[in-house]
């Protein structure tokens, strides 16, 4: 096999070479030969010096003798390959150094040239090494381009998901606003419900996915009021029995609006819309569920809704202070009893009651 010297020189440009040889005359002569092909060559007189240069620089090709003082070429090659299995190494060895060949092969050394060195065989080894260098460079460029593409696509996907999340949040706020237009007295009640429910779920140490979903869903708990007639929804006084039965249907109406979604957050919103008026003791509506028959999200929003309703002014009642509201929820009055609430949820609510007060005061019209 004859090597095209001109072609090899063209392909060798840009490749950095480290040549390690303890014999000064041989090192200088071989370095001159290498300089005919490679424009960037470093030399070292033993394995230790070669390893120090290797660790401080970036080389594409290592050419080394075996028997050298301080550190031989085998130990140097072993340390280089331990750090970079793909580093290309040509070993120049004498016949009496054959005992090292198996060890060098096991280390992954790529090419061998025997002394006394046959120039054509040396050029053949260089040609193969240059081809392998180019292959690794193409592979590295491909991997880098692939990683950049993946990173770009991941970034684009993340941005798209952010837009979807922001859009979903805006839709919730707009639907919430639509419900509030029907009942102007509720003010920022719906927004506060989302903040209360999130903190209560966090205090209960519920999974982050649950916390995120209930913060999204709670503001839409009363979406079913869109279907309640104005003369009932906006009535300035107390509702009579028939009107109250109609008012109760906002739970089932809300659930029907949100029914059969494939998205978890909307399914939780449906659950809350349906169950936020159920009571732990079974006296709630629309289905008279009791205890853990009531979904946890419904139990959480129930106490949040009751707290905010007591704090807010309504046509049929004044706004109560935080202190008075806490008394009513924890001790009861003629309309509310602590038995209405899940005991664990109630206890968590009591623990962070001051935060509810802060949320209420910070989110006014």
Image (cartoon, rainbow, N blue to C red):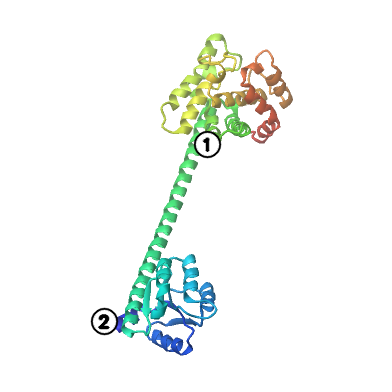
What is the spatial separation of the Cα atoms under label 1 and label 2, in whole angstroms?
Answer: 68 Å
Q: List x then y, in percent, for residue 99.
A: 41, 73
Q: Which mark is residue 124?
A: none
Query: At 50% across and 20% down in the image, what residue appears?
Result: 251
What label does residue 209 carry, if any?
1
Q: Nearer the viewer, mark 1 or mark 2?
A: 2
Q: Quadrant of residue 235?
A: top right
Secondary structure of the residue carrying tag 2 is loop
Q: Nearer the viewer, residue 59 or 169?
A: 59
312 left or right of 34 in image: right
How many numbered marks are there?
Answer: 2
Q: Residue at x 40, y 61 (%)?
A: 143
Crowding at mark 2 (Cα within 10 Å: few <14, some 14-19, many 20+): few
Identified at 52% across, 28% down, the residue is: 179
Q: Can you say which quadrant of the picture contains the C terminus?
A: top right
| Whether residue 54 can be seen here | yes
Rendering coords of residue 61 (x, y %): 42, 75
Q: Quadrant of the N terminus?
A: bottom left
| Label 1–label 2 contact, CB within 8 A | no
Task: Answer with left or right where residue 316 lies relative to residue 211.
Answer: right
Which residue occupies the foreground of this view, 300 or 5? 5
In the displayed structure, would residue 158 be above or below residue 25?
Answer: above
Q: Quadrant of residue 31?
A: bottom left
Residue placed most toward the observer, 171 or 201? 201
Q: Is residue 51 above or below residue 231?
A: below
Q: Position of residue 190 (x, y in %)?
A: 57, 30
Q: Which residue is mark 2?
A: 2
Q: Is residue 14 visible?
A: no
**In the figure, 320 relative to 20: above or below?**
above
């Amino acid at each position: 096999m004859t090597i095209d010297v001109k072609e090899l020189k063209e392909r060798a440009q840009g490749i950095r070479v480290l040549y390690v040889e303890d014999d000064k005359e041989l090192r200088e002569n071989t370095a001159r030969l290498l300089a005919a092909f490679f424009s960037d060559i470093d030399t070292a007189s033993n394995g230790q010096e070669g390893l120090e240069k290797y660790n401080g620089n970036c080389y594409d090709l290592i050419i080394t003798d075996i028997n050298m003082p301080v550190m031989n070429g085998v130990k140097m090659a072993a340390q280089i390959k331990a750090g970079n299995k793909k580093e290309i190494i040509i070993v120049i060895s004498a016949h009496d150094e054959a005992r090292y060949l198996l060890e060098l092969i096991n280390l992954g050394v790529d090419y061998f040239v025997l002394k006394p060195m046959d120039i054509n065989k040396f050029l053949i080894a260089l040609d193969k090494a240059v081809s392998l260098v180019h292959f690794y460079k193409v592979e590295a460029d491909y991997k880098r381009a692939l990683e950049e593409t993946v990173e770009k696509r991941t970034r684009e996907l993340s941005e798209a998901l952010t837009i979807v999340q922001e859009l979903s949040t805006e839709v919730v706020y707009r639907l919430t606003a639509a419900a509030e237009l029907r009942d102007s007295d509720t003010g920022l009640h719906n927004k506060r419900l989302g903040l209360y429910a999130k903190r209560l779920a966090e205090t209960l140490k519920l999974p982050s996915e649950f916390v995120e979903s209930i913060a999204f869903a709670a503001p839409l708990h009363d979406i079913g009021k869109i279907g309640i007639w104005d003369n009932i929804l906006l009535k300035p006084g107390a509702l009579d029995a028939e009107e109250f039965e109609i008012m109760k249907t906002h739970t089932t109406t809300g659930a029907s609006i949100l029914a059969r979604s494939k998205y978890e957050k909307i399914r939780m919103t449906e659950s809350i819309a349906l169950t936020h008026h159920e009571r732990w003791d079974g006296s709630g509506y629309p289905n008279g569920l009791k205890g853990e028959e009531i979904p946890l999200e419904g139990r959480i929003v129930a106490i949040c809704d009751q707290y905010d309703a007591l704090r807010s002014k309504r046509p049929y009642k004044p706004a109560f202070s935080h202190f008075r509201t806490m008394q009513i929820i924890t001790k009861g009055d003629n309309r509310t009893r602590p038995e209405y609430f899940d005991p664990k949820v109630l206890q968590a609510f009591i623990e962070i009651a001051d935060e509810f007060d802060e949320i209420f005061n910070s989110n006014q019209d």
